[in-house]
Image: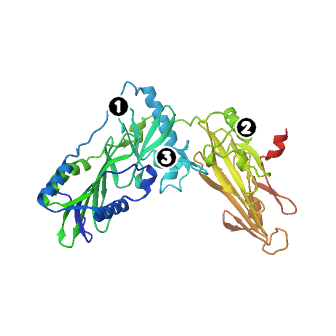
Amino acid sequence: MKRKIVNMGTIGIVVIILLVGVLNYKQVAETEMKKIETEENSVRENKTNYTNEQDSSNICESVKKVDFSSKEYSINWEIYTDQVALAYKENFYRIITNQMPLEYEEEKAVYFRDHLRGISDLDDMEFIEQFVKETRYRFIDCDGDGLPELLMDIGINGFCILKYLVEEQKVEVYHWLNEYEALLGSNQIGYCNSTSANNTRYGYKTLNRAGEVENEIYFTAYYGETGIEYEIYIFGDESMSGHLNQEQWDEVTKDFFTMLDCPVTMVTYEEAFGKNFTGTEALHGNTDEAMRAYDEFLSGERALENSGGSTIANMDDGSMKYLTCDINGDHIPELHIQTSGDYYILAYQNNVLFVLFHEQVEETLKCYGVCKNGEIVYKYTKENKESYSFYKFEFSGNAFKTIAFYRNDSNGNGVYDENDEYECNETICTFEEWTSSAEGYFSIDKNGDVQILHMMEWKDYNESKKR
């Protein structure tokens, strides 16, 4: 089969067979092109060069043993009942709508949206309506266990395969596909990248049952100094390379190119999840369970899932204070902890206690407070300047500013009066406009001091231990 070669300078044709180690999904961040070029350079340094017709034929025979036909595992409908299918959809939905963390890093929970580019301006509801419900999906068994994984088109980010672990009742990433890749079968991935100035690369890889790359093949096309050249690279215990003629090239690539033209069929959100499926809120637990977990943490009986397994002893600096308040609308309170140098928000979801948010603070310059409506207020004071910013948190830990106030005692008389500088939401305003906008957020006494309204009371940790 003939393939168009993008002519952008120099071009050639290479077939690469790679036997590689395990790649986890975080390593996908390294571009495929850079990885391949590194491997090619390594082979060129260590290769056994095959130039005669017999050797090239032998290498071609090795490539022809690869089965370039699409294969899909069958769903076991005896175990994947309607009830099980609903549980799968519910749990996938909670992950892709950012109601539950996908994983836990040192100082925060990581949600699905945190892995994606191009969506930072969307709040959680916009993400659901504009991304989750507008993209395409496929439930397909990728590991042969008779139960489906969820393949999701994530736009400029490529594709993601998610797996639901029934016993653990959690979803994890099975495999990331970059923007140049597409799923060709249950465990077969195709690759096509024509963006390079010097070549066009095609590729083929298979995954083992753990979602790790097992075998990898790349075809690269470029024009050399003497015209079109055809080479083959084999990576394994012994790395080899050799030249191919046009007939050999056509023979070893025809089945692959036929397969590459037929990725697995994707369907709409309604077709994948069901026309009337809207998902339900994550079952985070209940207030009693969360408060029990917080009490256990405060008493030193429980450690965090992330933050290096920290305990209360790692946070207590003698000035620690805490309170509980629901800030993300899941109806379960979060535990807020402030020390002289740090502010933490701990959350309890799905029987896991973890750091949802953490920031270092300088108590003399800035501090956090929690309003009864769940908003976080950030106060910053330095010399003759003050700012007050109010934030709302979402399920995903995504925080957005609802309103911000700033004032500067520009005349230096020690009093905030009508002759000073004022801003609301970074817009210059008068003293009257500033105080009017502040209604419902804070009051101002006769001395010009701000009193934030409807604040939650912090509890002194050391005092509470004495009771």
Comparing labels 2 and 1, the label whose residue is closer to the camera:
2
Q: CA distance from mark 3 to mark 2?
A: 38 Å
Name the quadrant containing residue 139: top left
Comparing labels 3 and 2, the label whose residue is closer to the camera:
2
Q: Tell me whether the residue at label 3 lies in contact with that at label 2, contact meaning CB atoms closer than 8 angstroms.
A: no
From the image, tell me which residue sits under label 1: 75
Q: List x then y, in percent, for residue 373.
A: 71, 45
Say which amino acid is labelled 3.
Answer: Glu
Residue that lies at the very extreme toward the top in this rendered image: 78
- Badge 2: how crowded within 10 Å, few (<14), some, or many (20+)? some
Which circle marks residue 169 in the picture?
none
Give me the residue at 82% from left, 68% from top: 417
Mark 2 and mark 1 lie on one chain; the one further toward the N terminus is: 1
Q: Is residue 394 left or right of residue 21?
A: right
Q: Is residue 18 above or below residue 324?
A: below
Which circle marks residue 129 in the picture?
3
Give me the residue at 18% from left, 72% from top: 226
Comparing labels 1 and 3, the label whose residue is closer to the camera:
1
Q: Can residue 460 be seen?
A: no
**Residue nearest the observer in this picture, 173 or 95:** 173
Q: Which element type, helix, strand or loop, lies under badge 2? A: helix
From the image, tell me which residue sits under label 2: 295
Q: CA distance from mark 1 to mark 3?
A: 30 Å
Q: Which element type, helix, strand or loop, lies under badge 3? A: helix
**Residue nearest the observer in this picture, 275 or 334:** 334
Q: CA distance from mark 2 to mark 1?
A: 45 Å
Q: Is residue 453 above or below residue 278?
A: below
Mark 3 and mark 2 lie on one chain; the one further toward the N terminus is: 3
